[in-house]
């Protein structure tokens, strides 16, 4: 256990095992996780079971994708000495708690989750009318509550998921008591800043749009991708003034560039004093400055993947200890303890 962890509030968060991560994943979550390591006792897991809720038909890359996610976490600065990292399926207690929660969760609560209908409509190439997909938020509740997380870092749009976790905790606590007390605390959402990060085509950066800059992209690839990025449509000719506030490249500058560069962009774009190629070059410089040290750190683990696997094993062992303690409490509270002494024995039995 990282030192001093007893005094710190506990944070739990997961990321689906989607393979290599892109800048959107970094800005939307990972960057915050790295910053939280010293302030909170952090449990970060690669959510491979969650990936199966949509990608169940072909599981050939799930394990490899989980490792790639972990490598990017380590590259971005998550430190196994300061946080616990593991793969969800390596701590099977998540599944047991999910099962028990599924007994008490009303169907209507799940059908009302905004992303349920939304994703079914958007992901038309897969059959998502499955039991596992509907139960996704119940698994999420188990992921968080099994560690009795105090906080769950989320963007505004994911607050309803945390609310559902709180409702499930409340319902469990209502039905089952442990020595007269409650088993689960109600975790709070920890609202994190998730700035709008456009992809190279101006839409939200996403693997499914093919518009990403990956954390592993080498410098020439980053520069090439930036060169083809869409800009303010009003700026057709070099002599036309533009507006960084409506330009996706301007959005990248706001996130990654220093104030001096930002001032040069604002002035130069609005007065047509700079060209878009020059402006894109500046943002590419900023990205390369962030990505180079990450790629340097990643190399160590790519050359020796066993190191990364050892980190996962140590993380799983640490997480399992806490998850095991919680499950003992859950079983006790529900009257299905594994202890012989706690079971009601038939008359005359010893
Ligand atoms: S100068 Fe920069 S901010 Fe302005 S339109 Fe071109 S790329 Fe966008």
Image: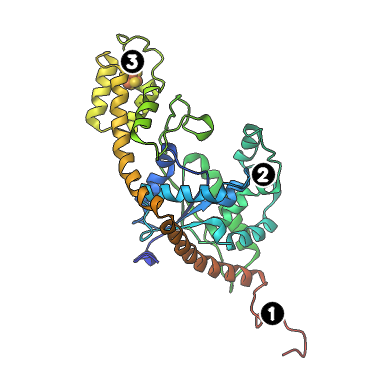
- Residue at 73% over, 83% down: 345
Q: Pointer 3: residues within 10 angstroms few (<14), some, or many (20+)?
A: many
Report the side of 56 relative to 262 (left or right): right
Q: Give the spatial CA distance, label 3 vs label 2.
A: 47 Å
* Marks 3 and 2, the one that precedes in the sequence: 2
Q: Pointer 1: residues within 10 angstroms few (<14), some, or many (20+)?
A: few
- Residue at 60% over, 67% down: 330
Which type of secondary structure does the marked residue at label 1 adopt?
loop
Q: Quadrant of the C terminus?
A: bottom right
Judged by depth in the image, the label closer to the viewer, 3 or 2, is 2
Query: To which residue does mark 1 refer?
Result: 343
> What is the x, y in percent for residue 267?
25, 19
> What is the x, y in percent for residue 53?
63, 46
Q: Is residue 227 above or below residue 34?
A: above
- Residue at 45% over, 64% down: 314
Q: Is mark 3 within 8 Å of ligand 1?
A: yes
Q: Say which mark, if any, is on residue 242.
A: 3
Judged by depth in the image, the label closer to the viewer, 1 or 3, is 3
């Amino acid at each position: 256990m990282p030192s001093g962890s007893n005094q710190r509030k506990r944070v739990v968060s997961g990321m689906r095992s989607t393979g290599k991560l892109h800048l959107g994943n970094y800005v939307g979550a990972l960057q915050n996780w790295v910053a939280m390591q010293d302030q909170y006792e952090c449990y970060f897991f690669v959510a491979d079971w969650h990936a199966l809720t949509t990608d169940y038909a072909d599981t050939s890359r799930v394990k490899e994708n989980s490792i790639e996610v972990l490598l990017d976490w380590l590259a971005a600065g998550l430190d196994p000495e300061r946080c616990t990292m593991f793969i969800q399926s390596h701590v099977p207690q998540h599944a047991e708690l999910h099962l028990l929660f599924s007994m008490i969760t009303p169907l209507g609560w799940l059908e009302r989750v905004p992303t349920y209908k939304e994703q079914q409509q958007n992901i038309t190439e897969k059959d998502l009318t499955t039991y596992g997909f509907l139960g996704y938020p119940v698994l999420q509740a188990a992921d968080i509550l099994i560690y009795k997380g105090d906080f769950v870092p989320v963007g505004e749009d994911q607050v309803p998921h945390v609310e559902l976790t709180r409702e499930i905790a409340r319902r469990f606590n209502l039905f089952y008591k442990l020595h007269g007390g409650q088993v689960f605390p109600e975790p709070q959402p920890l609202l994190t800043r998730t700035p709008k990060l456009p992809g190279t085509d101006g839409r939200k950066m996403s693997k499914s749009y093919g518009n990403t800059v990956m954390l592993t992209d080498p410098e020439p690839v980053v520069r090439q991708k930036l060169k083809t990025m869409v800009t303010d449509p009003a700026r057709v000719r070099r002599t036309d003034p533009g507006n960084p506030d409506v330009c996706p490249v301007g959005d990248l500058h706001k996130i990654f560039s220093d104030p001096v560069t930002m001032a040069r962009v604002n002035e130069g774009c609005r007065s047509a004093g700079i060209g878009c190629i020059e402006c894109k070059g500046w943002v590419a410089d900023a990205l390369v400055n962030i990505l180079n040290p990450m790629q340097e750190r990643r190399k160590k683990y790519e050359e020796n993947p066993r190191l990364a696997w050892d980190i996962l094993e140590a993380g799983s062992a640490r997480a399992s200890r806490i998850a095991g303690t919680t499950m003992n409490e859950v079983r006790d509270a529900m009257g299905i303890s594994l202890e012989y002494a706690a079971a009601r024995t038939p008359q005359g039995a010893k």
